[in-house]
Image: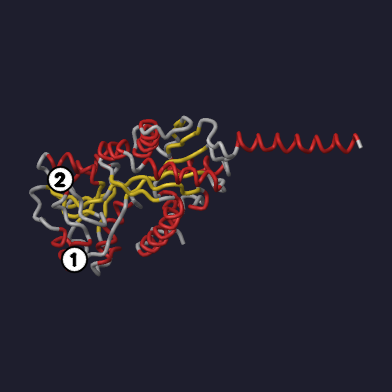
Amino acid sequence: MKKILFLGFLMTLVGILTACSETSEGAGEDYPNQSIELVAAGSPGGGLDTLARAIDQGLQDADLQNQPFVIENKGGGGGNPARAYIKEQDDDPYTLLTESNRVYVNNIVGNTELDIDDVTPLARMATEYLVWVVREDSEYTEATQIIEDLKEDPKAVQFGVGTVPSNDQMNIIRPVKASGIDASSVEIVAFDSGGDLMTQLLGGHIDVISTGISEAIEQREAGKVRILAVSSPEPLSGDFSDVPTWNSLGIDVEILHWRGLFGPPNMPQSAIDYWDEKMSELVETEEWQAILDKYKWFDAYADSETFKQALEEEKQTMSDLLSEIGLAEE
């Protein structure tokens, strides 16, 4: 009898210790109960680093942060090293990631086997929109003029982007294709960065650039460039209320140049639910709106399930377009 009671006691003790272990290491009822590693898939000062620090600061300022973030930068390699690291943290809710659409683009073009199944989408946090920009003295005053010239000769206009493949590139291919033009024949030149891209435009070395709206603001305010079209679903307000959307020009194209928050694969549902609640609260605060205004970002919040579905749809669209122009790996 004593042996039975002792064995029962041991089993109870093991159960308690196991529960405690799960609470401290996993996503127990008191999650999070320790600091969280937030990996930015980019170098300090870049967009993904800025997002990681903005989330941290926003949660602190809005008094929503239960545990501190420890931000780690893993830049380079097109984000592949950062995502490989996150995959290694399988089911660990104490390691998160800020990333962009490289979570599926890099797989499409064949430079990694990592795909959207190797991360857990938690929240699409913010977006930039993409624009067509020309010099102030350009012959083009409307995007439709460029489209008409391309219909006559797909090589009539030379475009510049920061990198390929990219959303900047999609902001050329998609409206061109939607206008009935062979997108594979259009000339698109990739430069090193947004800053170098603008230098090429201002120097007269390129006709039109496709870039994030934040990259064009300064030169537009200085009167050196014109913005001809923006990829937003709806017209923008304020300083950009005069910029037509593709939709308003009769071209069915919307592109979000988003950045988001991810977890490792097989993340516990309770942790996903926690971040759904926390991020949905954050994006409604004045503190987060101030952050959006500061960085010239736009609200594009999507919860975990909505974000996951959007990623799958985006991946299919991107795969089809990149296959069409010969950039997708067969």
Q: Residue furthest right?
A: 1
Amino acid at circle 2: Asp
Q: How packed is label 2: few (under 14 Cα within 10 Å), some, or many (20 or more)?
A: few
Tell me if 21 is positioned left or right of 107 in this view. right
Q: Residue at 38% across / 37% down in the picture? A: 55
Q: Secondary structure at mark 2?
A: helix
Callout count: 2
Q: Residue at 57% across / 46% down in the picture? A: 268
Quarter of the figure with residue 6:
top right
Q: How packed is label 1: few (under 14 Cα within 10 Å), some, or many (20 or more)?
A: some
Where is residue 284? Give x, y as percent: 34, 43
Amino acid at circle 1: Asp
Q: Nearer the viewer, residue 115 or 7?
A: 7
Mark linked to residue 320: none
For marks 1 and 2, the one nearer the N-term is 1
Tell me if 116 is positioned left or right of 322 in this view. right
Q: Which image quarter holds the N terminus?
A: top right
Tag nearer the camera, 1 or 2: 2
Q: Residue at 31% across / 52% down in the picture? A: 256
Q: Secondary structure at mark 1?
A: loop
Q: Nearer the viewer, residue 232 or 110?
A: 232
Where is residue 120? Give x, y as percent: 50, 48
Q: Which residue is mark 1?
A: 153
Q: Is residue 197 above or below residue 70?
A: below
Tell me if 50 is positioned left or right of 277 in this view. left
Distance (Cα) linking label 1 and label 2: 33 Å
Q: Which residue is mark 2?
A: 239
Residues at badges 1 and 2 in contact (C-beta under 8 Å)?
no
Q: Residue at 16% across / 46% down in the picture? A: 238
Where is residue 42? Give x, y as percent: 40, 38
Q: How is the image coloured?
A: secondary structure
